[in-house]
Image (cartoon, helix red, strand yellow):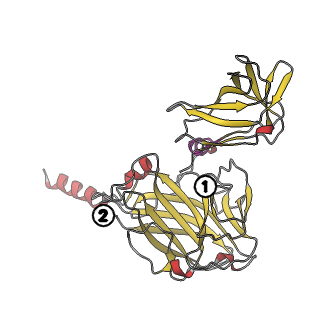
């Protein structure tokens, strides 16, 4: 190789360190999609997807803070939506109680990080955040595997009521722990908002820790009903630096979200959502088409009486629903609808009785 060619090759290698690679592993990071609704008030312990798709609130160890989560119509430049937490009643967490917002990355998508293998790479989390309550907040990233590992790092909200961009890089995880490369969750990101004293610890590098933890100095967002916290532009990429947030169309984001949650919500009375064939006097079998194949067999939530099985001029109000099957790789779900007075082998239309009618199929991680 000539000295000129060698010099060009060396120059290329100097910049090819893999510092910024891959794409955003977080779905709905711009907070565009809210299939379940744009606002929900929460008063119970547990975890739930309440408004924004792919973002879940968690309330651990019987902690039941009272708050409202909503899709806010404000954001920093370039973002029209954000996730907002408003405090509705003050609360002080004790012992190991935790409250925050989290999102999960499917195992197949998380595999690009190599976390839990000898080829592990650094990963970088970036986001825009805003709150009236300044101070230290914690993040915790989990890697799902035969042993669940996690790492914590904090960030600071410096100015009240001001959008700030944060960028946090986490080290490689080379400890072999057989990563969960599957349709189960592979990476989980916690944004901690309120934590009991037992779980407030010094920031730590990857450790065999599957429980929620946060960093020293963590604020308690729940200490005033004037407090709020907003986030948008959430991005997780491979590399030691953040990529620019990769904006995409609403349709692209919606289709990604519908792999995990899909609902038939006709929003009009008498709208037909499928054909059902009666296999007796009380059951009818049909299919609900979906936009994309769901990740796994979903759970079905609905109010049965919001639906009717109609044949000719007669409509029989439904009294129950159940999932029959998920057809792997296909964009439809087998559903069993129950109603009294069906005629066996006859084909009925499943129609909405009111504008609130929804068939919700949940295949979340």
At label 1, counting other C-alpha atoms closer than 10 Å, the crowd grade (few under 14, some 14-19, many 20 or more) is many
- Is residue 255 one of those drawn in magenta? yes
Residue in the foreground of this view, choosing between 24 and 47: 47
Q: Where residue 45 appears, x then y in whole percent?
A: 65, 65
Q: Say whether residue 175 is left or right of residue 297.
A: left
Q: Where residue 263 appears, x then y in whole percent?
A: 67, 40
Q: Where residue 110 appears, x then y in whole percent?
A: 42, 52
Check disc 1 and report the residue beneath it.
30
Provide the secondary structure element on which disc 2 rests: loop
Please report contact status of discs 2 and 1: CB closer than 8 Å, yes or no: no
The quadrant holding residue 324 is top right
The residue shown at (19%, 52%) is: 5
Residue range corresponding to the magenta coloring: 251-262
Q: Say whether residue 177 is left or right of residue 2.
A: right
Instruction: Please tell me whether mark 2 or mark 1 is closer to you in this view.
Output: 2
Residue with the most extreme left position: 1
Residue 297 visible in image? yes
Q: Say whether residue 102 is left or right of residue 176.
A: right
Q: Which mark is residue 175?
A: 2
Q: Where residue 88 appears, x then y in whole percent?
A: 76, 71
Provide the secondary structure element on which disc 1 rests: loop
The residue shown at (75%, 22%) is: 348
In the rendered image of this protein, does residue 158 appear above or below residue 331? below
At label 2, counting other C-alpha atoms closer than 10 Å, the crowd grade (few under 14, some 14-19, many 20 or more) is some
In the rendered image of this protein, does residue 20 appear above or below residue 183? below
Q: Say whether residue 44 is left or right of residue 246.
A: right
- Is residue 155 one of those drawn in magenta? no
Q: In the rendered structure, which disc, 2 or 1, sits on the residue that comes first in sequence?
A: 1
Residue 24 visible in image? no
The quadrant holding residue 272 is top right
The residue shown at (56%, 67%) is: 191
Residue in the foreground of this view, choosing between 146 and 138: 146
């Amino acid at each position: 190789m000539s000295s000129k060619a060698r010099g060009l090759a060396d120059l290329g290698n100097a910049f090819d360190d893999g510092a910024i690679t891959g794409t955003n592993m977080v779905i709905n990071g711009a907070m565009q999609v809210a299939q379940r609704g744009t606002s929900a008030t929460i008063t119970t312990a547990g975890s739930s997807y309440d408004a924004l798709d792919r973002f879940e609130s968690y309330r651990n160890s019987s902690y039941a803070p009272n708050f409202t989560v909503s899709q806010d119509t404000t954001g920093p430049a370039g973002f029209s939506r954000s996730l907002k937490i408003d405090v509705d009643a003050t609360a002080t967490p004790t012992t190991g109680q935790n409250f925050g917002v989290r999102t999960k990355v499917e195992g197949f998508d998380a595999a690009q990080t190599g976390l839990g293998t000898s080829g592990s790479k650094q990963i970088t989390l970036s986001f825009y955040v805003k709150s009236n309550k300044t101070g230290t907040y914690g993040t915790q990233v989990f890697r799902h595997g035969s042993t669940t590992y996690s790492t914590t790092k904090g960030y600071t909200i410096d100015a009240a009521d001001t959008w700030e961009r944060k960028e946090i890089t986490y080290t490689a995880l080379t400890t072999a722990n057989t990563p969960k490369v599957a349709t189960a969750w592979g990476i989980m990101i916690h944004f901690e908002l309120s934590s009991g004293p037992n779980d407030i610890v010094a920031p730590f590098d990857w450790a065999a820790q599957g429980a929620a933890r946060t960093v020293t100095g963590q604020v308690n967002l729940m200490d005033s009903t004037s407090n709020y916290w907003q986030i948008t532009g959430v991005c997780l990429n491979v590399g030691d630096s953040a990529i620019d947030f990769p904006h995409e169309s609403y349709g692209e984001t919606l289709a990604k979200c519908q792999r995990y949650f899909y609902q038939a919500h006709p929003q009009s009375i008498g709208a037909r959502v499928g054909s059902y064939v009666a296999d007796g006097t009380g059951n009818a079998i049909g299919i609900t088409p979906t936009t994309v194949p769901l990740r796994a067999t979903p759970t079905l939530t609905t109010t049965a009486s919001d639906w009717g099985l109609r044949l000719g001029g007669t409509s029989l109000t439904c009294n129950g629903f159940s999932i029959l099957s998920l057809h792997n790789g296909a964009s439809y779900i087998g559903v069993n609808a129950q109603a009294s007075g069906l005629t066996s082998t006859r084909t009925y239309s499943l129609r909405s009785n009111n504008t609130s009618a929804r068939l919700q199929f949940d295949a979340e991680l």
